[in-house]
Image (cartoon, rainbow, N blue to C red):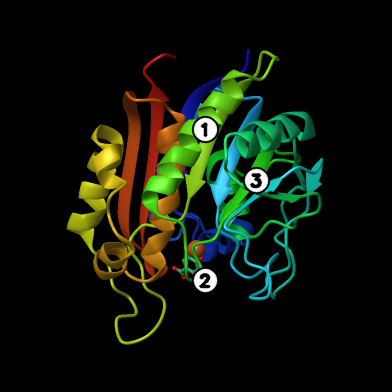
Amino acid sequence: MARITAGLTTSHIPAVGAAIDLGKTEEPYWQPVFDGYDWTKKWAAVNPPDVVILTYNDHASAFTPDVVPTFALGCADEFPPADEGYGPRPVPVVQGHSDLAAHLAESLILDEFDLTLMYELQVDHGLTVPLSLVYGQPEQWPTRVIPLAVNVVQYPVPTGNRCLNLGKAIRRAVQSFDEDLSVQVWSTGGMSHQLQGPRAGFINKPFDNAFFDRLIKDPEDLARLSHFEYLREAGSEGIELVAWLIMRGALGPDVEELHRHYHVPGSNTAVGHLVLRPADQ
Ligand code: DHB
Ligand code: FE
């Protein structure tokens, strides 16, 4: 049987990808951002999963405002990095796991989550920057990845409760896959940030730190946070945090916190990162 062995969340700031690609990680501005991933890199090297189910939001790279799937599952064998306006990032093509993805599609749709199924998908910084933060600059990514794109860009976006429940359904789906696979669930985006308008540059440290604690200890309560509260407390792009509840739902009721990192600023955002282990692992 497949099992969920860990969960991870991280910001996916595009400038972090550029800092890695251009060899700037040791510059004084970036060093404290990357220092917080040293623990994770060591942990990841000795805890290789077979597959990562990676929830992220596409930033008008693969989807245009004409096509806005709420949840889109990557069912292909490969996912090339998207050209976000300055050429694709110099990172390996992401290898998928089409058998597990087909099982997830069937299980989740029969579980009443009407996903969009993607048999071709280019992946942007929302997915590739987290892989770079955890795995550095390898020739090939050391794990297969099933992308799960969540719309948090164009209103209306899913509720936290819907995301938590989707995570729980992913747990049921993984646990009913008849192959002995170690599966991690990663959710990317956040933390507080606003890229536009009079509040551009908005950061809310107390909210972000409480969000970590609530995600770990009381996700059911956190799932009731309204969109209005996300926008007010975390900024317009801080709404990306809603998808962290997918990871949390997939880990089951109780988790152990293995690692936490928080740093301000990273580009225009608060950098936030967690590694969690489900209580049954
Ligand atoms: C920034 C952060 C994001 O999450 C994003 O998708 C785009 C830009 C930023 O901080 O610049
Ligand atoms: Fe983003």
Quadrant of image for the C terminus? top left
Q: Residue at x 69, y 41 (%)?
A: 138
Q: Please provide percent x and percent y for residue 237.
A: 41, 68
Residue 32 visible somewhere in the drawing: no
Vertical arrangement, residue 194 with respect to residue 111, above or below? below
Asked whether, in this view, residue 43 is left or right of residue 239, the answer is right
**Disc 3 CB within 8 Å of nearest ligand 2 atom:** no
Q: Residue at x 24, y 36 (%)?
A: 218
Asked whether, in this view, residue 270 is left or right of residue 167, the answer is left
Asked whether, in this view, residue 110 is left or right of residue 215, the answer is right
Distance of mark 1 from mark 2, alpha carbons? Answer: 24 Å
Distance of mark 3 from mark 2, alpha carbons? Answer: 19 Å
Residue 154: numbered disc? 2
Farthest-out residue, left: 206
Look at the numbered disc 2 and give the secondary structure of its residue: loop
Q: Residue at x 81, y 49 (%)?
A: 119
> What residue sits right under mark 3 in the picture?
147
Q: Please provide percent x and percent y for residue 27.
A: 45, 60
> What residue sits right under mark 1 in the picture?
169
Look at the numbered disc 1 and give the secondary structure of its residue: helix
The tag earlier along the polypeptide, 3 or 2, is: 3
Vertical arrangement, residue 52 with respect to residue 178, above or below? below
Q: Nearer the viewer, mark 3 or mark 1?
A: 1
The amino acid type of the residue labelled 1 equals Ala
The tag earlier along the polypeptide, 1 or 2, is: 2
The amino acid type of the residue labelled 2 equals Gln
The amino acid type of the residue labelled 3 equals Pro
Location of residue 216 by image quarter? top left
Q: Nearer the viewer, mark 3 or mark 2?
A: 2
